[in-house]
């Protein structure tokens, strides 16, 4: 047998050996000494290895704030990002998505990969011997994992989802899905709880963004609201209650990522005209450029400019309902009168056009042409699934129901 004793990692290796077949009588071991200078050099080289950052984009983030957070100081990389393609990528930064950065110890960028809005493609820069190389390419095949989380409201929805490790995009989607039944600006109570099952997209073993919500339950003031994702016969995804009542054709009370209400429906002193006037909608404070979504399936009735509304879109829905979206900074390219839109489609972007003192969305719901309070009006519900479709729905969503039951079981176990 043989044995090896390392007396110094950076100095020498001392080894003793016993020749096979030799007697067990005492003997003088032979000491073998080998200098490990090459090992020392490799360890010193390892100190130059760069840092890898998997960073979630925060609300209001810019490349400058991200560079500061990851300790990057690289004017050459900044110059590359300030070229047209890089500027376009910067305008597409969205909170909740993830970027990947490799940074040398001296602050130079080895590589940076930014997510592009509305697509799985990414904009990347990479340092080579010839300098910074820019590339905008399709993402490599990603893995989809199913995440299961739950939480409890202590103060706000986003505070609770942050505490549960849930991405902001999923929190916003929760508010959107349940917004037809829960007013998140006034109905939340301490102790309300939620369960959510959603997709997490992984790229080379790293979570890069969240996908769809597959199932969710929200218990608000003791009443449980549950939704399950199901693919309709026409190939589109839609949310249904466990008894087969669809939600996708109901109206969204929040036609943009959940934000603060800055002005309610009703009379008020107009901030520009300084006179008492009726306020025929609800105003949502949001940053300029925030995407605005269609509140329900419908047809574009008007897209253009109307006096105090500025840039406005009016959609015609079933059962004599209309929705209007005012003060927009821009419309989605190609949107025109007569175009069909589905609930959740982005139709425009928050702005401050018309009679507005700052960026916000003015949102109206009209019934028979008369404006109603979007936060209080009884909105139409979708038609339930018919018998044959309901049977297929219950069969296909049973696994999701089981996952929600498991989350409820873990919540009860923690409480005990």
Image: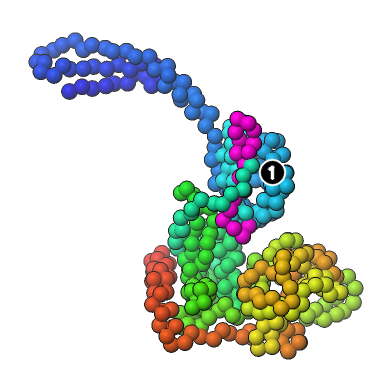
For the rendered model, the colour scheme is rainbow
Q: Name the residue located 52 percent from the left edge and 32 percent from the top edge.
A: 49
- In this view, 290 is above or below 405: above
* Left or right of 100 on screen, residue 300: right
| 46 shown above or below 66 | above
Identity of the residue drawn at 53% across and 73% down: 236
Could you say which quadrant of the image residue 311 lies in?
A: bottom right
Tell me: 118 left or right of 302.
Answer: left
* Picture quadrant of residue 37: top left
Q: Is residue 197 visible?
A: yes
Give the residues drawn in magenta, as a range: 117-133
Q: Secondary structure at mark 1?
A: helix
User: Which residue is depicted at the point 42% across and 71% down?
Assistant: 400
Please state if 249 lies on the left or on the right of 16 as rendered: right
Nearest the eye: 353 or 88: 88
On the question of residue 412 being in view, the answer is: no
Reading the image, the residue beneath label 1 is 81
């Amino acid at each position: 047998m043989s044995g090896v004793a390392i007396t110094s990692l950076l100095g020498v290796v001392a080894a003793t050996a016993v020749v096979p077949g030799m007697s067990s009588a005492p003997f003088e071991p032979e000491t073998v000494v080998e200098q490990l200078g090459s090992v020392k050099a490799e360890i010193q080289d390892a100190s130059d290895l760069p840092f890898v950052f998997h960073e979630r984009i925060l609300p209001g983030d810019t490349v400058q704030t991200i560079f500061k957070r990851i300790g990057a100081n690289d004017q050459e990389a900044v110059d590359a990002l300030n070229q047209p393609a890089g500027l376009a990528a910067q305008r597409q930064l969205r909170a909740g998505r993830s970027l990947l950065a490799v940074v040398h110890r001296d602050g130079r960028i080895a590589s940076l990969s930014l997510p592009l809005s509305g697509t799985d493609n990414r904009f990347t820069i990479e340092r080579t011997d010839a300098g910074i190389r820019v590339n905008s390419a399709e993402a490599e095949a990603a893995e989809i994992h199913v995440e299961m989380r739950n939480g409890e409201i202590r103060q706000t929805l986003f505070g609770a989802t942050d505490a549960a490790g849930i991405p902001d995009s999923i929190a916003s989607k929760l508010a959107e899905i349940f917004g037809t039944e829960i007013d998140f600006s006034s109905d939340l109570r301490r102790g309300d709880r939620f369960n959510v099952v959603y997709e997490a997209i992984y790229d080379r073993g790293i979570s890069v963004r969240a996908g769809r919500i597959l199932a969710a339950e929200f218990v608000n003031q003791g009443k449980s609201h549950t939704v399950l994702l199901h693919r309709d016969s026409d190939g589109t995804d839609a949310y249904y209650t466990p008894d087969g009542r669809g939600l996708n054709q109901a109206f969204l009370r929040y036609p943009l990522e959940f934000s603060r209400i800055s002005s309610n429906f009703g009379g008020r002193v107009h901030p520009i005209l300084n006179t008492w006037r009726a306020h025929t909608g609800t105003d949502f404070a949001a940053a300029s450029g925030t995407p605005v979504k269609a509140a329900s399936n419908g047809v574009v009735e008007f897209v253009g400019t109307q006096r105090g509304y500025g840039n406005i879109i009016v959609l015609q829905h079933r059962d004599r309902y209309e929705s209007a979206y005012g003060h927009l900074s821009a419309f989605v390219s190609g949107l025109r009168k007569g175009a069909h839109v589905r609930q959740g489609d982005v139709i425009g972007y928050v702005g401050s056009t018309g009679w507005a003192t700052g960026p916000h969305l003015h949102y109206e719901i009209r019934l028979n042409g008369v404006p109603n309070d979007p936060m209080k009006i009884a909105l139409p519900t979708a038609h339930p699934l018919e018998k044959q479709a309901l049977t297929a729905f219950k069969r296909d969503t049973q696994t999701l129901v089981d996952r929600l039951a498991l989350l409820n079981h873990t919540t009860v176990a923690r409480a005990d």
